[in-house]
Structures are given as C-alpha cells and as structure tokens.
Image: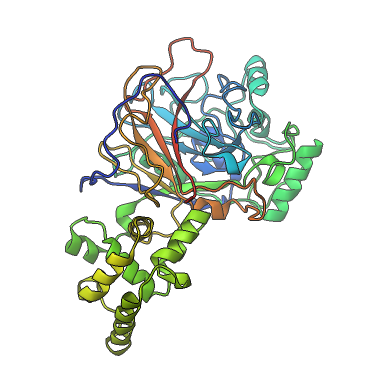
Amino acid sequence: MPSVETARPAQQAPEDEEEPDEISWNLGFVEEPEKPHLLLRHRFPSKVGGRPAWLDPVRLPTRDMLTCRASGRPLDFLLQIYAPVDANPVEGFHRSLFLFISPEGSRLGEPGAVRLFRCQLPRQNPFYSSEPPKDKDKYPQQLKPSDADASRDRDPWRSVDAEQPPPASSSSGSPSLASAKKRKGGGCAAAAAAAAAAAAAAAPSAEAASSTAAAELTGAAAPSSSGGGTASSAAAGPLPRTGVRGPGGLYPELELVVEPEDDYRDEDEWDEQEDEQPTAQAAAAEGERRGGDAASGAGGGAAAAAAAAAASGGGGGGVEAEVRRALQQYRARVAEEGELDEEELPPDVLEAVEGSLVPEQRCFADFQARVSWAPQQVVRYCFQDGAQALWPAPHGRPGPGDVPACPCCGGPRKLEFQVLPQLLHFLHLDEEDPASPDWSTLVGYTCAASCSPPPGAECAYVEEVVWVQGPAP
C-alpha cells in the first residue's frame, strides 16, 4: 500500500505490462566504507544506515514528517540515493532520495509507516561549491551558527554535529562539491553510482561501531576507527533516541554502490533471448536442478524464503508425483550428459513444473531468475518511462490510480527505485524480534517532473510515495 495519500490520483500503467526492451536498470550493492568521511553530505553519497547525510542541511523535514504515522514513534533512517535526473537538470543539479521506516517492523504495511523524501539543489547554492572536492576536503563546509541551530532543532540524528571534524583534526573544512557527471544507463541513480564508485569506502569494525555508539549515547568521546577517521566524531552529541536496533539507534552504515544490470548478464543470454526474461518454468526447473541454490540469492525476508522453497520444489510440498518423476528423469540425464542449457531442458519437465506452480511460485520464479544475475543486489533503480518493478509476489501490487499525483505540481509520479528483501540480511536484525522489519519489496514512486518546493518553502524536502509489498500472507 502507498506511504502517503492525496486526493488527486495519477493514472499508472498496469503493473503486469511487459517492460520495453530498451529499459536499462542499475543495481545497488552494499559495501563497508573504508573511509566513512566519504559518506558525508558534501560527497553526495548513496548509502544505507548511519545518520542521514542531508542534502539541504538546514531546511530539513519537520518532526511530524519524520514520525511514523502508524505508531507515532520517530522513524528509522534506512537509506539514501543520490539521483539527479534529466527531468529538472537546473533546479535538480543535486538530487537525493531519503527512505525511512517505522521502528515497529510489523507495521510497515500501514499508511505512513514507510516514508520517502526528495530533496534537490541547483549547482549554485549556499552549501556546496560548484567545483569537485579535493582529497583534503574531508568534511563539509561548516554551517553558520544560526543554520546549525536550525538543523539541530529538526534533526533527531544531529548530523550537523556528527559531520564536524574532531578537535585534533587539521582538516581545512573548505567547501567542496562532487561532480554530477552521469554514468551510462540513463538514470540519475547512475550519477549516484559515479559519486559512490569514485568515493568507494568501507566501515569501521563492529567493535569500533559499538564503541562509537556507546560513546554517543553517553556523550563521551569515541575512539576513531582505523579507516582514516569516523563520520560519528566525538563532536556528535548523544542521540535523543535509545533502545532502537543498530549501533546508537542507527542501522549499520554501508556504502551503496550502483552498477548497470547489463554488466551482470551473460552475453550468450543476451544473444539467445534478446532481452527477454527467463520463463518461470525454466527458473523453477533450474532451481530444482541446483537444489535451491538459485533461490538462496533472495537473501532475506520471510516471504522471499518461503517463496524460494516453493519455487524450487523444496519441503516436499507443491510438486505432484508426475513432476517428481519428470525431474528424476531430468536429473538422471544431467548425471550422464552434464548440465543442460535452457534450450535443452526437456519439455515434459517444463510443462510439469509449469502446471504445478501456483501464482505465488510462478511469480517468485520469474523474480528469482532476474535477481540471480546479481544475487547480492539490494536496490534496483531506473527512472526511464515504462520501467516496471520486479515483484517477488503477485499480491499487493498497485493498480491504475493507486499511486497518487504529486501534491506540489499535480503531475503524475513514476517508478524510480525498489528495495529488495536482500537488504534485510545486511541490517543485522534479530530474527526473533517481532519488531524487526520485513518486506517483499519497497517501491519508490517520485514526481515525473522532479518539481521543486514553492519558493521560500520552510522545508526543502518533498514527500513522495513508497508502495510496500509485505510478506506473503
């Protein structure tokens, strides 16, 4: 269901339409940052967890915007994507998306429990230089005292304090700006990829993170990591929230590196299938042949795990005797002749598997076949017209008119990115905790024109829509 509601709906293309062949997706992968200061706001990072690296550090979302509408509790910061788009290249020279989720993971399907905000700035702005940063520019330009106070007043994470150089630092603190050069693949997430790839970095150890968190909660100085400094310096004040999952009330901070999906697809597959997605039958048969290995790429989420077992015929359920007979014959042939490619898969196996799959299994087989090109992906990004989300399950998808229009300009929203269940694996969640989040996928829809807030607006962040497809019922 959508994360926000407005009175004027925008017509959406049916989600079951076939995606045009020319659509190119970018895939997001997480890496531990070696130099956390490269994930500060003046580097325009794409990242998961930690504190938000606000694009506009002063005109922040209000406390009400950063509150879960379902539980009334402050939201947890999940991730951000640096994604300039051609739709508004002047006012949106810099553009970032910020995704927040409820601390009560069992309520993510309720309205307002997952919230998405978009912020953008022109090249000439008060916070960043129009030139790329130098290597010595480890920290953003310091804000005026009045602006810093305004930022602290709204920001539960107090990022303005965390981004200051530690007392002993000799950093020049000069203003800087990352280039907005876009990578191939069309989208502005590709620009995020360029910034992220150029600033690739890994994070402090778990022990260092825990030590930093403890210091933050007590207000004491924290030891810096061995990776050349820490984004959460001793200057950062204690977080106002305690008892939230993750170090110091934060999810683990990871760099989000974006790469074209085309780089992960086998060239022979391109030639043979001409961009056509593998069929559910072939995916299910392959899952059975590999003993479920392909399904393991789903990487997290109760819905994904259950569907993976179903699609691969695991657990002894859902596969009729005729299917088992055909698969046994197929495995015997593989034992004699070696692995078979898709064109050599016996028709009786494909027909038997296809006939035995319920819609949930068939949908997940298609999902897993596509994800298996790069099993570690956690985010899929595409701002092209006609892009379709990759749904792990047939339930709970938006229909025409379900995604509301942009409240600022009244124009339609379009799909921009989706978060896969694989990300749950990297959040180090307590599986026994009923409050831990779970989803099949989170799909972000943003204004197709990437419009700006009205001149003089108190907040520089526009709320967009997240469609939450929860775990299978």
Query: In which quadrant is the N terminus drawn?
Result: top left
Residue in the foreground of this view, choosing between 325 and 256: 325
Q: Residue at x 42, y 64 (%)?
A: 310
Using the image, determine if residue 166 lies above or below residue 88: below
Using the image, determine if residue 453 lies above or below residue 16: above
Residue farthest top in this picture: 456
In the rendering, at what x and y percent does residue 56 appear? Answer: 52, 24
In the rendering, at what x and y percent does residue 17 appear? Answer: 24, 43
* Image quarter of residue 352: bottom left
Q: Does residue 22 appear anywhere in the picture?
A: yes
Q: Residue at x 59, y 37 (%)?
A: 102
Residue farthest front in this picture: 321
Residue in the foreground of this view, choosing between 136 and 230: 230
* Image quarter of residue 318: bottom left
Q: Does residue 282 appear anywhere in the picture?
A: no
Q: Is residue 22 left or right of residue 95?
A: left
Q: Is residue 260 left or right of residue 52?
A: left
In the rendering, at what x and y percent does residue 285 appear? Answer: 32, 71
Using the image, determine if residue 297 lies above or below residue 65: below
Using the image, determine if residue 414 lies above or below residue 17: above
Q: Residue at x 73, y 44 (%)?
A: 213
In the rendering, at what x and y percent does residue 395 appear? Answer: 40, 46
